[in-house]
Image (cartoon, rainbow, N blue to C red):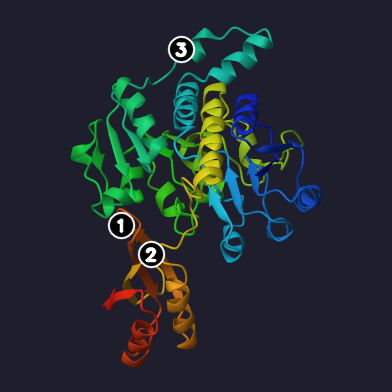
């Protein structure tokens, strides 16, 4: 199996892929047209990327069957095109959670103690202890979390250790899939993002970017923030209305820590202009939340695990683009002798009846003499077709139809 790695990647990961029997092509600077060409020329089976954009022309250029995002979010990959072409998309969830949580706490502490401003004035030869002795402190101040996935949970653990009460809004609690009372860290559940903002001294965003979360932290949420409160975003810029946030900075004295911006350079280095980054009280970092040695080593190991599993078993861990619900309406259960041609016979007759197979599973019994096939269909075969299928092959022992 040939693997094209089109981003900077840990040596341990490259070595692990080679040890798994993969042919590795390492082109860490490939992007745009150059990456499209590399996919075509290498005929790679697997593409591994970190922040590089994976577009429709890239996915259509070669023979890719799997794209691995060596990180958590996968909004840089054209998942819709991958799905249309039957290309798996997989990611490495949770492996950078601690790194992002650590940066979140670093930004909160830096805002409270105005660390960057301290450094700037000291480097300019100014001593101003009276001014920089003024800080609120974190103990007893309420931290609001929007989102409670892997990163939100790690932030909560650390904030709890600082003695901070925690209020959280998450769809897992809003829909009843989880209960705040069952969580390791004590917290209060807010019914809406707006309520979370109103209750918080510090509001931190930890939402994945999806169609449902794009722009979710809107003006209606930001306007509920208390004067002089803190706002942190280490998730995705597209989740937050930065224009509304900029107004709140000017009108309410909100102090802000941002690791993500609306118009980031596509490469690792480049010119950067974003009005919000230059506002007083805004501390920014260079989208480095996941960029610790520990996180990158963990992501590399997970990438190797994903590719190895695909190579050895055909199964893809962490796949994100399989259908959650298919158009299947009925299941055809076929009990049969484990002989060549039985399922081909079934499929041929289903095709003649213009019935599409959505999913199929064939389970072999001990001794490999008999099996049961479960075949999900987008319609119900007629009684006549069922009779034709059963009587047309002597190795079919029984079949019946189940509505699903």
Give how far across and how far down residue 156 sits, in percent. Answer: 34, 31
Q: Residues within 10 Å of mark 2 (few under 14, many from 20)?
A: many
Q: Nearer the viewer, mark 3 or mark 1?
A: 1
Residue 248, x across and y down, in percent: 49, 43
Where in the figure is residue 197, as x and y percent of width and height?
36, 43
Label 3 sits on residue? 133
- Judging by the rendered image, the residue that carries numbered circle 1 is 365
Question: SS of the residue at dot 2?
Answer: loop
How many angstroms separate mark 3 from mark 1 (CA)?
Answer: 74 Å
Q: Residue at x 67, y 46 (%)?
A: 263
Indicate the quadrant containing the N terminus: top left, top right, bottom left or bottom right.
top right
Residue 145 vs residue 263: left or right? left
Secondary structure found at label 3: loop
The numbered mark, 3 or 1, whose residue comes first in the sequence reads 3
For residue 394, which quarter of the picture? bottom left
**Can residue 38 be seen here?**
yes
Give left or right: position of 390 versus 270.
Answer: left
Residue 338 bears which disc, if any?
2
Label 1 packing within 10 angstroms: few (<14), some (14-19), many (20+): few
Judge whether residue 281 can be spotted in this image: no
Relative horizontal placement of residue 349, taking residue 290 as reference (left or right) = left
Displayed quadrant of residue 326: bottom left
- Real-space CA distance between mark 2 and mark 1, rounded to the nearest whole angstrom: 9 Å
Disc number lying in front (3 or 2): 2
Relative height, residue 3 to residue 192 (above, below): above
């Amino acid at each position: 199996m040939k693997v094209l790695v089109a981003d900077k990647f840990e040596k341990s990961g490259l070595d692990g892929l080679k040890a798994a029997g993969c042919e590795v092509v390492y082109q860490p600077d490939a992007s745009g047209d150059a990456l499209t060409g590399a996919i075509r020329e290498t005929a790679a089976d697997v593409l591994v990327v970190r922040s590089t954009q994976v577009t429709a022309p890239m996915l259509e250029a070669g023979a890719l069957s799997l794209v691995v995002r060596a990180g958590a979010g996968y909004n840089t990959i054209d998942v819709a095109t991958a799905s249309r072409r039957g290309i798996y998309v997989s990611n490495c969830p949770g492996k950078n959670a601690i790194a992002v949580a650590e940066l979140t706490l670093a930004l909160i502490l830096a805002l409270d103690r105005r660390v960057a401003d301290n450094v700037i004035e000291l480097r300019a030869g100014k001593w101003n202890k009276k001014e920089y002795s003024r800080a609120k402190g974190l103990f007893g101040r309420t931290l609001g979390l929007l989102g409670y996935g892997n990163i939100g949970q790690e932030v909560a653990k650390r904030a709890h250790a600082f003695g901070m009460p925690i209020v959280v809004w998450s769809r897992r609690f809003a829909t009843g899939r989880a209960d705040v009372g069952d969580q390791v860290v004590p917290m209060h559940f807010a019914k809406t993002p707006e309520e979370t903002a109103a209750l918080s001294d510090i509001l931190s965003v930890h939402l994945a970017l999806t169609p449902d979360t794009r722009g979710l932290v809107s003006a209606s949420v930001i306007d509920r923030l208390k004067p002089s409160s803190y706002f942190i975003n280490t998730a995705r810029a597209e989740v937050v209305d930065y224009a509304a946030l900029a107004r709140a900075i000017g009108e309410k004295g909100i102090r802000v820590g941002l690791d993500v911006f609306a118009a980031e350079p596509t490469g690792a280095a480049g010119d950067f202009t974003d009005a919000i980054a230059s506002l007083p009280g805004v501390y920014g970092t260079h989208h480095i939340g996941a960029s610790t040695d520990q996180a990158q080593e963990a992501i590399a190991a997970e990438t190797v695990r994903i590719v190895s599993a695909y190579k050895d078993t055909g199964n893809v861990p962490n796949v994100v683009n399989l259908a959650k619900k298919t158009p299947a309406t009925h299941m055809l259960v076929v009990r049969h002798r484990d002989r060549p041609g039985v399922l081909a016979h079934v499929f041929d007759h289903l095709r003649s009846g213009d019935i599409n197979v959505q999913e199929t599973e064939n389970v072999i019994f001990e001794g490999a003499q008999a099996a049961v096939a479960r075949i999900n269909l987008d319609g119900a075969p007629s009684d006549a077709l069922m009779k034709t299928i059963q009587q047309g092959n002597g190795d079919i022992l029984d079949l019946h139809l189940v509505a699903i």
